[in-house]
Image (cartoon, rainbow, N blue to C red):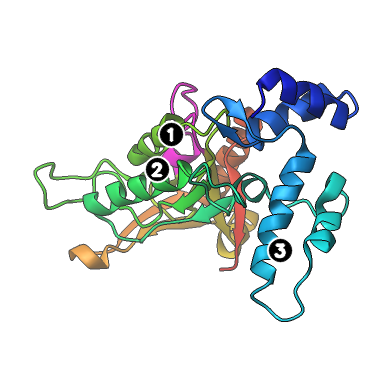
């Protein structure tokens, strides 16, 4: 086992004096146990990866040897796996995902579903994973519900919950990563677009709007555009809200200029 000072000095030499690369590697990828480090340089990490990959290779015909795999990893020469792989493969000291990012969600519009997604997000994030999920299936604000509340607070109202979960789940000096998306057709889209005007809220999530070709054509022609939500599962009639496609687009672009969010996802209509 090594102290952080020992690891820093060895890694600084490995990175030819680059403090940023050294600090990032130590904080994010070097194995630790009880406050001590088990790897002094990225070369130790590459040996760990090579050993584990070689073990799995033996299960298949014509396996690559440890030496062949190590030569691909060494000095970050040919293959640089994702961060979760660098940290998690061969790591027996921590429960860690071997995938960087996951898309989750069950498309059910209920309180139980909303909280189940929150737990799923927390479970993935505690294993170092980033998460993305779409909230377009949640009914818009003021829609009827069958519980004591009478009406829903809307899709946007649950964004702070998911954002807070991201901030609450510590990831060993690494910020959590969350992406929330909403369809351009959703009646709550305007509230979604401006949801980050208050810089004290939704600080643990990035947001993106799912754009369709149909919407962009309406913007180009400066037509009205229908925001729709079809609640087939709760027996209500389809809700249609008419807006100006151009005005909605301008609001989206202004907000992206103002705060670099929301981003856009291009969907084929």
Question: Answer yes or no: do the residues labelled 1 and 3 have beta carbons within 8 Å?
Answer: no
Q: Is residue 21 magenta?
A: no
- Judging depth in this view, the residue of 125 and 240 nearest the camera is 125
Label 2 secondary element: helix
Local crowd size for mark 1, using a 10 Å CA cut-off: few (<14), some (14–19), many (≥20):
some
Q: Position of residue 183 (x, y in %)?
A: 47, 55
Q: Main secondary structure of the magenta part?
A: loop
Q: Residue lying farthest front?
A: 1
Chain part drawn in magenta: 190-205
Where 134 sits versus 261, above or below? below
Residue 160 picture location, percent across and down = 38, 34
The residue depicted at 54 percent of the width and 40 percent of the height is 177
Identify the residue at horizontal 87%, vertical 26% (top origin): 13
Q: Is 14 on the left or on the right of 101, as rendered?
A: right
Residue matched to label 2: 122
Q: Which callout, 2 or 3, points to the residue nearer the camera?
A: 3
Taking 86 as reference, is 109 above or below it? below
Instruction: Specify whether residue 196 is painted magenta.
Output: yes
Q: Position of residue 255 (x, y in %)?
A: 58, 34
Q: Residues within 10 Å of mark 2 (few under 14, many from 20)?
A: many
The mark that comes first in sequence, 1 or 2, is 2
Q: Quadrant of residue 260?
A: top right
Can you tell which quarter of the image residue 71 is in? bottom right
Does residue 134 appear left or right of residue 57 in this picture?
left
Name the residue carrying label 1.
169
Looking at marks 2 and 3 on the same chain, the residue that comes earlier in the sequence is marked by 3
Marks 1, 3: nearer the viewer: 3
Secondary structure of residue under mark 3: helix
Marks 1 and 2, how far apart in space? 7 Å
Q: Which residue is mark 3?
A: 54
Determine whether label 1 and label 2 are within 8 Å by CB. Answer: yes
């Amino acid at each position: 086992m090594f102290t952080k000072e020992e690891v820093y000095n060895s890694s600084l030499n490995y990175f030819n004096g680059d403090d940023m690369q050294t600090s990032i590697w130590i904080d994010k990828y070097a194995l630790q146990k009880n406050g001590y480090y088990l790897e002094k340089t990225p070369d130790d990490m590459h040996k760990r990866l090579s050993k584990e990959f070689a073990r799995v290779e033996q299960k298949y015909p014509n396996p690559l040897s440890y030496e062949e795999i190590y030569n691909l990893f060494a000095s970050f020469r040919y293959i640089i796996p994702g961060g979760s792989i660098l940290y998690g493969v061969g790591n027996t000291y921590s429960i860690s995902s071997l995938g960087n990012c996951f898309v989750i969600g069950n498309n059910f519009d209920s309180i139980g579903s909303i909280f189940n997604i929150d737990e799923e997000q927390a479970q993935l994030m505690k294993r170092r994973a980033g998460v993305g999920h779409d909230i377009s299936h949640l009914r818009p604000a003021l829609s009827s519900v069958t519980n004591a509340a009478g009406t829903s607070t809307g899709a946007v109202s649950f964004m702070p919950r998911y954002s807070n979960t991201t901030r609450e789940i510590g990831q060993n000096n690494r910020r959590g990563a969350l992406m929330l998306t909403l369809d351009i057709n959703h009646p709550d889209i305007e509230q979604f677009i401006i949801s980050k005007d208050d810089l004290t809220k939704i600080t643990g999530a990035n947001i993106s709007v799912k754009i369709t070709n149909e919407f962009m054509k309406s913007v180009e022609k400066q037509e009205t555009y229908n925001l729709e939500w079809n609640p087939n599962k709760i027996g209500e009639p389809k809700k249609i809200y008419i807006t100006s496609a151009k005005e909605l687009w301008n609001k989206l672009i202004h907000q992206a200029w103002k705060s670099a969010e929301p981003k856009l996802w291009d969907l084929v209509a």
